[in-house]
Image (spheres, rainbow, N blue to C red):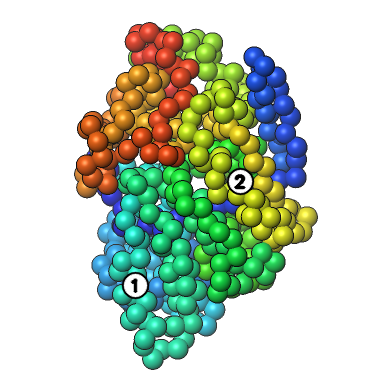
Amino acid sequence: MRISNTSKVVGLLALIILAASCFSNKAVTKNEEQYVSIPASPQVVGNADSGYQYLITGDYLKSGFPLALFKLSNFKEKENFLQRTGANADIPYDWTAITAANGEQVVAPNCLQCHAQRMGDSLIIGLGNSLFDFSTPQYGSLAIAQKVVMSGSNYKMKEASNNIFTAVTAASPYLVAASRGVNLADRLTAVLASYRDPVSFRWMEKQQIKITEEVIPTDVPAWWLLKKKNGMFYNGFGRGDFSRFLMASNLLTVSDTTESREVFSHFHHVLAYLYSLEAPAYPLAIDQALAMQGKKLFEANCAECHGTYGDDGKYPDLLIPASVIQTDPMLYESNFSNPKFLEWFEKSWFKTGDRQADLVPFKGYIAPPLDGVWITAPYLHNGSVPTLDVLLNSKTRPAFWARDFNKPEYDIQDPGWKYTVSDKQYTRSTYNTTLSGYSNKGHYFGDKLSDGERKAVIEYLKTL
């Protein structure tokens, strides 16, 4: 299956996320290790259709790039995947034309920059985008646009574009990854928070929080998994009202918390839409006899953490301590575990009202649901493993592997990205697992399987 690439500026303008809850964790002792069961949080769930429309046409970002200038850049989409009308009809699916508060027409990034991906001729909403490029400075042509707009005489256009130009200029130097295909939304959130007053969300000229030097990557989890989870993000620190931090993309351009409250009033509908999403069904024939063998192996070896599936399936919402999972620790040690960021968050708008948010750091990672796992490569929280087969056979994981980002191809039969192996990082398209934060170590549970057993488990995973 051939997959199309996305625009270079997608990475910087990705959906920003924060986490929230007011519930404690329940520890479960297993083999003298503390597994943590995450309790459910009450959610306010709206109308899925309204949520979808707000997601693809809403003004949750209220500052953007001039519509006329955007169209001159040749960012056009012939397919109109979202069947939008008016100014949005020929704009790429991950951008939205909106009317700024002063009446000017601008174009702003939307949530699908991170949370949708083209697969062949289709767009899969909810699939994490693993094709964008954070590996070079993101500002590029945007700096030219800023110069054109801000040096012009159209005051209203300057006003409508100022907030996004300010945020992009400040954040860009912090957002350079070592390899293509990873996401830096966590770091973007931390950078934006460092410039915003926590109570009012107004932009401050001087940074209030020191940003760590480490640039830690993540992969983007599939949206359709959210309805099973009691805690968001890879280490489960997102609790409480999910809508509160789903709308935190607004931090990119927000003027003050009055605006945040208005945007927040729509996001219980967006949550309903996310809850309505289902994983894509595996499109090829499945060896049912082999899959049944794999199901037995899965339930004996994997289900305790990842859950069971089918009509009577159950998901345990377990956080697995670092000493057990042994995957790269840098993500849970960085960004949202930064004491200064936690202090900012405790003072912030996210902690106000009767639907508050909270951050609950944990030294380890959540064992995610596996619905649609066949299409969600690369694997592990940092996207360091290209296929399911090498995920379940750690000795075969490549230290350096590369995708063709110009003509990327996904292997459906042996689920994962088609890749080449090298002896070092020759280009930015090579994933370098020897770097801090990029390690492919850990999750060794599949190593005890024979080749035949591993094949059977993968055949079963195609059915989820």
Dot 1 falls on a residue whose secondary structure is helix
The residue lying furthest to the bottom in this view is 153
Query: Where 164 sits versus 321, above or below?
Result: below
Looking at the picture, how far across and down is residue 84, in whole percent? Answer: 40, 61
The residue that mark 2 highlights is 337
Residue drawn at (50%, 74%) of the image: 163
Looking at the picture, how far across and down is residue 30, in whole percent? Answer: 66, 17
In this image, 11 relative to 337: left or right?
left
In this rendering, does residue 46 appear at all?
Answer: no
Dot 2 falls on a residue whose secondary structure is helix
Residue drawn at (45%, 88%) of the image: 155
Which numbered circle lies on residue 327? Answer: none
Neighbor class of circle 2 (other Cα within 10 Å; few <14, some 14-19, many 20+) is some
Looking at the picture, how far across and down is residue 139, in whole percent? Answer: 35, 65
In this image, 1 relative to 49: left or right?
left
Query: Where 215 sits versus 83, above or below?
Result: above
Query: Where 308 sits versus 118, above or below?
Result: above
Sequence-earlier tag: 2 or 1: 1
Looking at the picture, how far across and down is residue 92, in whole percent? Answer: 34, 60
Q: How far apart are marks 2 and 1 (CA)?
A: 32 Å
Neighbor class of circle 1 (other Cα within 10 Å; few <14, some 14-19, many 20+) is some
The residue lying furthest to the right in this view is 354
Query: Where 134 sits versus 461, above or below?
Result: below
Dot 1 amino acid type = Ala
Which numbered circle lies on residue 143? Answer: 1
In this rendering, does residue 199 appear at all?
Answer: yes
Residue drawn at (60%, 65%) of the image: 208
Q: In the rendered image, which quarter is residue 405 located in?
A: top left
